[in-house]
Amino acid sequence: MERLNGHLDVNEKTGRKDLVTNIDKDNEKFFVKQLRALEPGSKVLGEEGLGDKIDSLDGQVWIVDPIDGTMNFVKQRDHFAMMIAYYVDGVPTLGFIYDVINDKLYHGGPDIGIYVNSESMNPPANNSLEDGLIGMSGPLIIRDVHHMQEIAEASSGYRIYGSAGIEIATAISGKTIGYISHLRPWDIAAGRVLAETLGMTVSTIDGKPIDMLSSNTVLLATKKAQKDILKISTKR
Amino acid sequence: MERLNGHLDVNEKTGRKDLVTNIDKDNEKFFVKQLRALEPGSKVLGEEGLGDKIDSLDGQVWIVDPIDGTMNFVKQRDHFAMMIAYYVDGVPTLGFIYDVINDKLYHGGPDIGIYVNSESMNPPANNSLEDGLIGMSGPLIIRDVHHMQEIAEASSGYRIYGSAGIEIATAISGKTIGYISHLRPWDIAAGRVLAETLGMTVSTIDGKPIDMLSSNTVLLATKKAQKDILKISTKR
């Protein structure tokens, strides 16, 4: 927050819509150092590549997104998140999504429950696709991947917030019935822990388990909405 | 806020995606009564039809949206607004957009300047389409009206928040370079006052003046982004 109105060094990664700033990198350096100290022997997989090279989830692995929604961060100074996940031998164990501007930390795991700041979160209502709003990725809608437009039309409406962390925080709060986007490990690792612990489902858009070391088109949804969406997304 | 967690009577208007609640109606009744008392002789055009029948903007006219983003209100209890505009002989004079959950009142007009709560707002940077995020309407994107998908692709990214009031508050705050949606008078009346006073443009998607007594596909944008968008939206 102190650095929010200061100068940003903004650089493109794979193109003009894929940005990284000096603060993404500084945050990741900070997290890598702190997490290694917190849990000696653990490894850190970070979006900006400043942690460890990870080719398996054996042992204790932290997965870090130092700023999720960097485009929002750069253009809005709003609607972005910081995310950390902790997996032990591949088992989703702890997740943290910090909505920085609203000062809301969504955190917890299967052994301790899920909290927003110090308040316990209840599982969201198991609403159907038709009965809920759904968060989506802009490019998937335009390219109409996996009948994304039909899924949007079947819902009560689709929303695009531009940050996986903010979208997943919205879904686990029951404000949307789910979220669909093409995500890398650090985009979904923390949200998966929180969502599954709260009784939501996390799978690929065709209903398979996600590969935590690769990219996936992820469907995070209530159990009912997942069924409704798979009926559409897996049509020929 | 007091009634936010109470029971809602939800009814469909033109279809399952066009909702009205008892609170929309109660709010509008309240506004109609208070505004008539504030300015005797004035007329009130309200979304729910509980004010006056208006077929011209002669005289003093209030234009009221008691809850903008009713779907968000019903499904999220978040991301909705209350809006009031004051037009005198057709001249945009005062606008009020209240982002209820964030307790932010955007208000003012050409004679007094624009404020968020008690803080004066500066005109947003005159950024181009390419350099900014843009707010859009979900249905316009899916139907690809006026090359909406090409406009989205040309921007830094598109966002869908699901409430004209929230979208316009975001644009005048400089967090998006504009907003495109099919809007009725009460969706745009207040936002037009605020945006124009802050040096932004408000027109139809093909660059014509909007008709304040009818529906328009509205383009609200920085001057630069308007030019960029019209080049795409008016292509054959």
Image: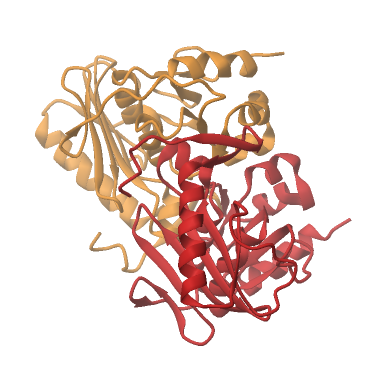
Chain colours: A red, B orange
Q: Is residue B195 above or below residue A45?
A: above
Q: Is residue B179 left or right of residue B94?
A: right
Query: Which residue is outermost to the right?
Result: A236
Q: Measuring 50% from the left and 68% from the top, which residue is drawn there?
A: A172
Q: Measuring 27% from the left and 52% from the top, which residue is drawn there?
A: B26
Q: Measuring 56% from the left and 35% from the top, which residue is drawn there?
A: A11
Q: Is residue A124 left or right of residue A61?
A: left
Residue A173 seen in the figure: no
- Quarter holding the C terminus of chain A is bottom right
**Of residues A28 and A174, which is closer to you in this image?**
A28
Q: Measuring 51% from the left and 35% from the top, which residue is drawn there?
A: A10
Q: Is residue B193 left or right of residue B35?
A: right
Q: How many marks?
A: 0
Question: Residue B176 appears at what percent x and percent y?
Answer: 45, 32
Residue A77 seen in the figure: yes
Q: Is residue B47 above or below residue A148?
A: above
In terms of image quadrants, where is residue B7? Answer: bottom left
Q: Is residue B216 above or below residue A72?
A: above
Question: Residue A79 appears at what percent x and percent y?
Answer: 44, 48
In terms of image quadrants, where is residue B172? Answer: top left
Question: Residue B85 appears at what percent x and percent y?
Answer: 27, 30
Q: Is residue A45 left or right of residue A21?
A: right
Question: Residue B110 appears at what percent x and percent y?
Answer: 22, 18
